[in-house]
Amino acid sequence: MARHPDGQRSEVGRLYLYLGGGHQPLTRPPQTLTGTHPYGRFAAAIASLGDLDKDGYGDVAVGAPLGGDGGSGQVFIFRGQSEGLMAVPTQRLDSPFPGPAAFGFALRGATDLDGNGYPDLLVGAYGADTVAVYWGQPVVVARTQLSVPDGLNPEVLECVLPDSDTPVSW
């Protein structure tokens, strides 16, 4: 429940994340993420997505089945990091269905349905009797190449080190 400046309360939803570690699990206070849409039911459904961005930390989908415009539902994607989850979602999925669809009522992630190496997300919409599939895929692919000559001749000093004017071989 969130208290508004006028004293009224509204249900927004809250996720509590307890991080375990070592031989004393759950010793730190929980991280909290709070919804912003009144009566949106943020965190009514939560799903691990695996490591979407391949940074070594698990990412999470959080449903707010009555959030968004018209209460049709939303799903928020939070990236993992060493301290837990980022405080702000990196992506928001709005309901693709008309009316009060309860998009985000059920979530399932961390499974690579199409075999491309990235986990996919299934989002249930109770009011639409439908499941939406979001395919995980790379956003940016970088390739580098380094070419080195077969040998260096230490006698030929044709390059100069920046900021030192020292000639070196190349």
Image (cartoon, rainbow, N blue to C red):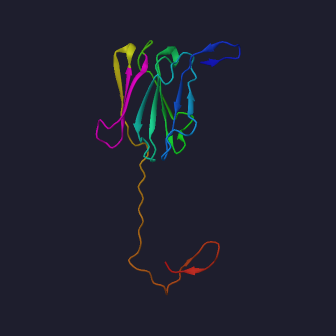
Q: Residue placed at 61% from the left, 80% from the top?
A: 166
Give the camera-side residue of 12 and 151: 12
Residue 147: percent from left, percent from top: 41, 68
* Number of marks in picture: 0
Q: Residue furthest front?
A: 23
Q: Is residue 121 left or right of residue 6?
A: left
Residue 95, image quadrant? top left
Q: Residue placed at 41% from the left, 17% from the top?
A: 97
Q: Quadrant of the N terminus?
A: top right
Residue 5: percent from left, percent from top: 71, 17
Relative height, residue 145 to residue 77 (above, below): below
Q: Is 60 in the magenta? A: no
Which secondary structure class fits the magenta region best?
strand
Q: Residue furthest right?
A: 6
Residue 137, image quadrant? top left
Q: Residue placed at 34% from the left, 22% from the top?
A: 131
Find the magenta span and give its range.
Answer: 102-124
Residue 9: percent from left, percent from top: 63, 14
Give the camera-side residue of 57 and 128: 57
